[in-house]
Amino acid sequence: MATLHERKNYREAIMRTLYEATEGNRLLGVAGAKLRDDLHMPEQDLAAACTYLAGEGLITVDWARGNTPAMVTLTHQGIRFMEAEEEEPR
């Protein structure tokens, strides 16, 4: 199981990847298998991160058998969250 630090990094990576891949369009999504492969993330950690982000209202998940994310999409709230992150000075 992932550490707290790893879990936070996984969630941030999912949000960033979704936002970049969909260009902030909530009508587009990314296949769970593509996220897993692109982020080199274990299946159970992807499912846990998606469950957390969905619970926060930032993404929606279409689940496949075995509690596996089939399609992941940003919500309006998720897009606003990423836009605020993008505007924040570093």
Image (cartoon, rainbow, N blue to C red):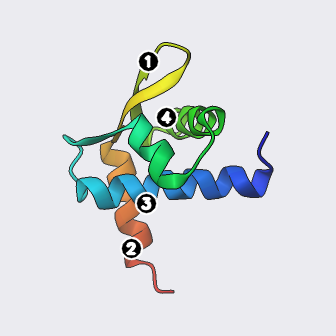
The reply, left or right, for residue 81 in relation to residue 45 is: left
Identify the secondary structure beneath mark 3: helix
Alpha carbon distance from label 2 to label 3? 10 Å
**Disc 4 residue type?**
Ala
Q: Viewer-nearest of labels 3 and 4?
A: 3
Earlier in the chain: of badge 3 and badge 1, it is: 3
**Disc 3 residue type?**
Arg
Percent across and percent down for residue 19 are: 34, 57
Percent across and percent down for residue 58 are: 44, 43
Q: Viewer-nearest of labels 3 and 1?
A: 1
Alpha carbon distance from label 3 to label 4? 15 Å
Earlier in the chain: of badge 1 and badge 2, it is: 1
Q: Residue furthest top?
A: 65
Q: Viewer-nearest of labels 1 and 4?
A: 1
Residue tagged 1: 64
Q: Badge 3 local density, few (<14 within 10 Å), some, or many (20+)?
A: some
Q: Badge 2 local density, few (<14 within 10 Å), some, or many (20+)?
A: few
Q: Is residue 47 above or below residue 83?
A: above
**Disc 2 residue type?**
Glu
Q: Which mark is residue 85?
A: none
**Disc 1 residue type?**
Ala
Identify the secondary structure beneath mark 4: helix
Which residue is painted at 57% across and 32% down in the image? 47
Residue tagged 4: 54
Earlier in the chain: of badge 2 and badge 4, it is: 4
Alpha carbon distance from label 1 to label 2? 31 Å
Which residue is painted at 53% across and 37% down in the image? 50
Residue tagged 3: 16
Residue tagged 2: 86
